[in-house]
Amino acid sequence: MSDKIKSDAVFGLARHYRFQWEEAQGGYVLLFPEGMIKLNGGAGEVIKRVDGKKTVGEIVADCKAAFPDVPDLEADVLAMLQLAHEKAWIALKE
């Protein structure tokens, strides 16, 4: 899955994953039948925008609008989406 993430691609959470804020963890998590993945703040902000409707470009634009002072934000968002796709946390919508 080393293909580059395209700006017009649309991703949704992969089957068996649920995204939510977990107060006990103090952050966003991905829950799945075998356990939980705690996401750091930036990863949580990206994944919460993965809704099966927004394109990658729209997710990047939304993150840039929410965090205008973060340098190289586009590269970070794309890297997070690439990682999430490689780990099968998110899936390409057809």
Image: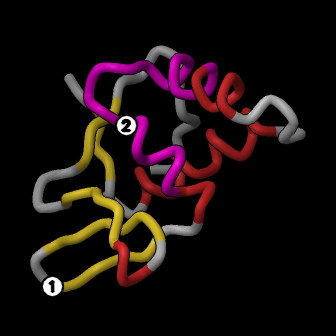
User: What residue is drawn where x is 52% and y is 40%?
Assistant: 3
Which residue is disc 2 drawn over?
A: 50
Q: Nearer the viewer, residue 34 or 87?
A: 34
Residue 71 against residue 25 in the figure, above or below: above
Q: Position of residue 1 (x, y in %)?
A: 44, 50
Q: Position of residue 38 (x, y in %)?
A: 43, 76
User: What residue is drawn where x is 29% and y is 59%?
Assistant: 20
| Colour pattern | secondary structure
Report crowding for label 1: few under 14, some 14 to 19, many 20 or more residues within 10 A (C-alpha): few
Residue interval drawn in magenta: 44-61
Q: Is residue 14 magenta?
A: no
Which residue is disc 1 drawn over?
A: 34
Q: Position of residue 70 (x, y in %)?
A: 84, 41
User: What residue is drawn where x is 32% and y is 58%?
Assistant: 88
Residue 12 against residue 47 in the figure, above or below: above
**Left or right: 28 in relation to 12:** right
Residue 47: mark in rendering:
none
Q: Nearer the viewer, residue 27 or 19?
A: 27
SS at mark 1 in the image:
loop
Earlier in the chain: of badge 2 and badge 1, it is: 1
**Left or right: 25 in relation to 56:** left
Q: Nearer the viewer, residue 35 or 62?
A: 62
